[in-house]
Every structure is written in C-alpha cells, then in structure tokens.
C-alpha cells in the first residue's frame, strides 16, 4: 500500500515540478520527512540519453536545502553543467517571476486608478481657489499632518489636486492621469518605469510636495549639474508658488551655500554631490561643520532618483572616495616605468584586456628582481616607500591598457593627467585613479609625478541610498532589473501606462560578427532613410564610446554624408545643446555617445527658439 502511494507521488512530483517556482521547491525541501523523499525523486527525474533535470539536495545536519539544474548524461552521469552556465534555470525562474510581478502590478494599478478618479473629482473645486487660497492650502496641510492625520489618507488626494492646478497656473503643464499614477507610485516607495517623453520631471513634483509638508526635506536626485539646475528652475516654480522653499546643490558651492540649500523643503542635487557631502559630514569634527539636514550626517526624508537604473544599478558599486595627498616616491615610479618599457608581453607578462589587468609570470618577477638588485619584489625596503611589485604592475598597466587621448589626456601646460569618460568623452574634473596608477601614467608621459592619494573616506551609491527611509525612483528602463532592484533596495518596479499609444516602431536587434560589418550596415540604413539630404529623415545614432562615434562619422563621411558629432569632448561642449536641439531637423544626422539624461528635448522639425537664436547671432556677428 505504501509502495503504491510512493509511486503515485513520484509521478505527480515529476508532473508538477516544472510549474513550481524555486521558492516553492525550497519550501517543499525544507519540510521534514517530505524533503528526504523529494530530493531523490528530483535527482532521478532523468530521461534517456542527455537530458535536463532538477538536482535537489537536503542537508539533514543543517536542515537546509539547495536546488540546482543540470544537464545530465546518463552514459556519463559524473559530468554535468550547472543551471547558471546553462541559463535554463534562470530563464525558467525569471519567466515565473515576471508573470507574478505583472499580475501584481496590474492589481496594484487598478487600486491606484480609484485614487486618481478621486483626485479628478477634486479638480473643479481646486480650480476655483485664488492664488492666496492655494498658498493657504499648504499651511492647512501642514497643520493637519502635525495633528496626526495620515499622509496616505485623504490629504494625499487633496495635495495632488493642488499640485496639478499649481503646475497648470505656473508653467502651463497639467498632469495627465497616468502622471498622477506615477506620482502615487513614487509616494509608495516604488520605482516608476515611464517611457521617454512621458514627463517624469513633472511627476516628481507630486510626491515631493506632499512629503515636504511633513517638515522633512524631499530630495530630487539627478545625474548631472545641468539637469539639477534645469529641473529646479522649472519645477521649482511650482513648489515656490505653493509656499515651499527650493534648494539647488551645484559643484563649486561653499559650505554655507550648501547648508542653506539643504535646509530647504525641496532640494535638487546630483548623486555625486550628495555622496561627497555625506562623506564630508562624516569627517566633520562638530555638528556645526555638517551641511545635510539635521546636522547629523544622515538622511531622513523622501528621495526620488531620476535615471534610477543608471544610479542604483550601473554605478551602484563604484565608490565615491575622499582622499588626502601624501608625498609619492617619484624616483620609484620613474624607475618602474623604465623597467616596464623593457618588459615584453608573453615573455614577462600576460594582458587581460577584459578585466583591465596584467599578470607577471615567473620570468617577469625574476628579471625585475635581477634588474633592481632586490631579493623579492614584495619585500618592504628600509625607506618604507613600499614594495616594488605594485609599482611595476601599475607601470605595465599604464603601458598596455591606458592610451593617451582615449583613456586619458595630458592637461594643458603638463599640469597632470585627466581621465576621459569612455561613455561621454568628457574629462572627469578632479577624478584620479587610485593605488598609484595615476602616478604611473604621469611617469609614462614624462611629466611631474604628483602626490599620491590616501583614502580617508568612501561610500558606494548602494550603501548611500539604502539609508533613506523613503526611497523611490523613476526611469525609462527598469523591468529588466526589477529583481535586483527589489532585492537590493526593496524597490518594487511598476510600469506606468503611456498617456497616448506609442507611435514608435521597435525593430528586432541585428548582430554582426565584426564592428566593420556593423558600421557598413549602419551606413546603408542612414542612406536608405535619406540622411544628409534636405528631404530625408533625421537620424540619431547612439554609440558606446568616443572612439566608436568617431569611426562612424568617418564611415559616413566616406559616403558624402555630413554629420553632427556629439561626444562631450571639450571642443564640442559649447555647441552641445544646439546640436541636440536641432537633431530633429530633416536630413540631419547626429552621432552621439550614450549620455543618459542630456536634458534637451529633440523636437521633430527642429527647435524654433534655438533656430531663432542662431539666426540672431549670425546677423549680429557676420
């Protein structure tokens, strides 16, 4: 009888296995008795020949379970490929998670839609209020919250209705219903995925106003100073109209200016400026020397991050570092550079281009030790200047991995080495490579070796933003990183419907074996679209590096197509906004690096105000 039950259970186990999520299987395995039976069943779910099967184990000593997915060869059962290398398990789990997440988001949006309808019902009464009465609403909301009214209750709908009316009166922009949805999502501490052009900046005014009423600062995080100033100047008008104070943090501000800006109700600041202010506050010797709200060096307020996928995922592990300068052993850097010039690849070292690393082999170490007259490259010398190994390795890295005018540039008058951002082509002002690499590159270029840095404080964006008690974000692409955002920041991603159906047509990606073949196909597409001709369609080409953008411009020039190049090199900086503003004119071909959040709208047909400015300038100066 028991045997029949076990046989039946085994059949059903195999049938339902592929409909269970990893969490469900783990729950089954963690249950006493059943785990000891299910594990062998999962392991034995193998068909003839080569097949795929779940391999589950249950550790009776630790009462823990683990799940893997393998390719199993019955003819050679000792060989297997894990789920991670196959990708099948990942696809299976991701597919189930995406379905669950989509169903939950649909239910969540349906609940929010009811609140949007109630906000719309308040619109008629709010429209009748005068300007003074609108400002009085802010004080009314503050008193109600101070008395203990729930910020997520009726006051939320009233505040959103007031902000919508204020935006229409001040900047003549009225929030669409889907933008109200976005505001509600941000207020709930989620990440709103909104398509490009759906007005994310306007959406942020809703939750920032509401949360600022509690007396705590609302932070709006942007990716560069230009966007922070633009958003403050435009959206700040709405907050000021309603009686709130608005602050702006920019590079170059002194301590008093920063403290005054951070004391405002709503603060516009870049992620890097916020991070460095946080570090400086923790190095302060007294509360009076801090600039963040509360004089504690900590965050306590609402935060909305624009371009959240870039800030919270792409740059999450890149540390912000404050360092102090200490004397560098210049002679040692120059000697290491001379030695590196005489070392040969393969003979003395190997180059790992993917990981930007070099590895000295045994002969490399021995020849270096012989040339320097030391017993070991890892021994600390009597002068305490440091072992030779890092100096030599950095010198070889500078020789093999870092190229002038690609990864770095020599600053005017040989005042040092400037790092070039590979994505934008900008020279990163004030940024330096650590661990002696910067000095090694200076020695390579034959300029004066600068003082080296010693780290005294550092923090990653991941650690920084997890400190906010109320964190939210908005971006155009987040669903692909939904699981990581939820796991790392507890930020659930919710896509916001578009106000109108999307007219853009998205075509499938095309892959080529070589960069040259891809460039040829790209040029053909531009020619077919009429790029470069007065009657053709405007073409925007995005690239991932300065080098790639320049090679595409060269390829297009060979076909007689004139292009506008935008890669943020210093010579292009002055015309940056003009190039982007006119990228929508007929036949204009623009090649640009992937500068997320450039902040200038591309209007089909071109931007009339920019054209008027250019014409006026031509008349005045020609």
Image: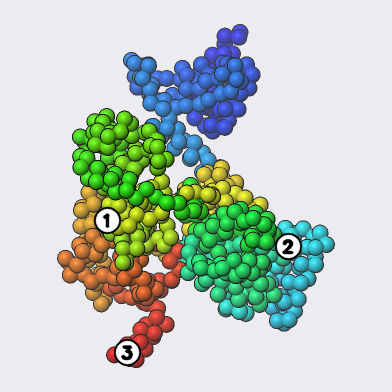
Q: Secondary structure at mark 3?
A: helix
Q: Position of residue 465 (x, y in %)?
A: 58, 52
Viewer-proximal residue, 351 or 149? 351
Q: Residue 395's spot in the image, x, y percent?
A: 30, 45
Q: Residue 531: in sight, yes or no? A: yes
Q: Which mark is drawn over residue 621?
A: 3
Q: Position of residue 64 (x, y in %)?
A: 58, 23
Residue name at image x 31 percent, y 30 percent = 375
Q: Earlier in the sequence, mark 3 or mark 1?
A: 1
Q: Which residue is mark 2?
A: 214
Q: Residue at coordinates 53% horizontally, 25% vertically from top-left? A: 66
User: Split into 4 quadrants, where in the image is the C terminus?
Assistant: bottom left
Most foreground residue, 133 or 578:
578
Q: Is residue 510 visible?
A: no
Of the 4 image quadrants, the one containing the N terminus is top right
Would residue 471 appear left or right of 89 to someone viewing this image? Answer: right
* Residue 446: mark in rendering: 1
Q: How many marks?
A: 3
Classify 237 as above or below 394. Answer: below
Separation of marks 2 and 3 at Cα, in angstroms: 53 Å
Using a 10 Å C-alpha cutoff, classify the residue at mark 1 as few (fewer than 14 neighbours), some (14 to 19) or many (20 or more): few
Q: Earlier in the sequence, mark 2 or mark 3?
A: 2
Q: Nearer the viewer, residue 169 or 558?
A: 558
Residue nearest the viewer, comparing 130 with 100: 130
SS for tag 1? Answer: loop
- Mark 2 or 1, nearer chain start: 2
Calculate the distance from the C-alpha at mark 2 to the C-alpha at mark 1.
Answer: 58 Å
Crowding near pointer 3: few (<14 within 10 Å), some, many (20+)?
Answer: few
């Amino acid at each position: 009888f028991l045997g029949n039950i076990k046989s039946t259970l085994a059949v059903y186990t195999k049938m339902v296995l592929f409909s269970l999520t990893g969490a469900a299987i783990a729950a089954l395995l963690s249950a006493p008795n059943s785990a000891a039976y299910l594990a062998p069943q999962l392991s034995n779910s193998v068909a003839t020949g080569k097949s795929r099967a779940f391999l589950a184990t249950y550790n009776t000593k630790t009462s823990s379970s683990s799940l893997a997915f393998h390719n199993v060869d019955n003819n050679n059962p000792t060989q297997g490929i894990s789920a991670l290398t196959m990708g099948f398990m990942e696809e299976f789990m991701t597919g189930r998670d995406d379905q669950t997440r989509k169903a939950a988001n649909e239910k969540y949006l349906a609940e929010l839609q009811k609140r949007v309808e109630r906000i719309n019902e308040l619109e008629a009464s709010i429209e009748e209020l005068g300007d003074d009465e609108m400002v009085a609403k802010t004080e009314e909301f503050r008193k109600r919250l101070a008395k203990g009214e729930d910020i997520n209750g009726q006051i939320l709908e009233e505040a959103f209705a007031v902000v919508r009316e204020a935006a229409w009166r001040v900047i003549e922009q009225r929030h669409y219903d889907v933008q109200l949805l976005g505001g509600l999502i941000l207020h709930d501490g989620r990440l709103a995925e909104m398509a490009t052009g759906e007005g994310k900046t306007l959406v942020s005014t809703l939750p920032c106003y509401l949360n600022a009423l509690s007396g705590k600062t609302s932070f709006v995080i942007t990716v560069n100073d230009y966007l922070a100033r633009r958003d403050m100047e435009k959206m700040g008008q709405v907050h000021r109209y309603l009686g709130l104070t608005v602050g702006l943090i920019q590079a170059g501000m002194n301590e008093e200016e920063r403290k005054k800006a951070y004391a405002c109700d709503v603060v516009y600041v870049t992620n890097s400026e916020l991070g460095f202010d946080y570090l400086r506050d923790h190095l302060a010797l007294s509360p009076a020397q801090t600039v963040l709200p509360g004089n504690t060096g900590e965050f306590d307020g609402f935060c909305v991050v624009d371009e959240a996928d870039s800030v919270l995922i792409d740059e999450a592990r890149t540390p912000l570092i404050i360092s102090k300068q200490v004397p560098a052993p210049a002679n040692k850097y120059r000697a290491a550079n001379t030695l590196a010039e005489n070392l040969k690849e393969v003979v003395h070292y190997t180059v790992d281009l993917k990981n930007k690393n070099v590895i000295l082999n045994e002969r490399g170490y021995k020849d270096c030790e012989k040339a320097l007259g030391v017993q070991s490259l890892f021994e600390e010398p009597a002068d305490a200047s440091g072992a030779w190994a890092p100096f030599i390795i950095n010198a070889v890295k500078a020789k093999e991995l870092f190229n002038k005018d690609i990864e770095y540039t020599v600053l005017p008058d040989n005042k040092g080495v400037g790092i070039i951002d590979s994505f934008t082509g900008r020279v990163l002002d004030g940024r330096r490579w650590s661990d002696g690499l910067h000095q090694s590159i200076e020695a390579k270029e034959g300029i004066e070796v600068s003082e080296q840095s010693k780290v005294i404080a550092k923090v990653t964006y991941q650690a920084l933003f997890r400190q906010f008690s109320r964190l939210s974000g908005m971006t155009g692409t987040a669903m692909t990183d939904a699981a990581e955002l939820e796991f790392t920041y507890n930020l659930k991603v919710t896509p916001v419907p578009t106000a109108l159906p999307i007219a853009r047509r998205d075509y499938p990606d095309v892959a080529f074996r070589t960069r040259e073949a891809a460039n040829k196909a790209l040029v053909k597409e531009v020619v077919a679209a009429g790029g470069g001709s007065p009657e053709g369609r405007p073409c925007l080409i995005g690239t991932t590096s300065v080098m790639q953008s320049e090679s595409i411009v060269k390829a297009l020039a060979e076909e007689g197509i004139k292009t506008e190049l935008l890669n943020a090199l210093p010579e292009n900086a002055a015309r940056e906004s003009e190039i982007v503003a006119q990228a929508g004119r007929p036949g204009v071909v623009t090649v640009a690096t992937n500068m997320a959040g450039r902040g200038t709208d591309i209007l089909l047909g071109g931007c009339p105000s920019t054209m008027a400015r250019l014409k006026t300038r031509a008349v005045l100066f020609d």
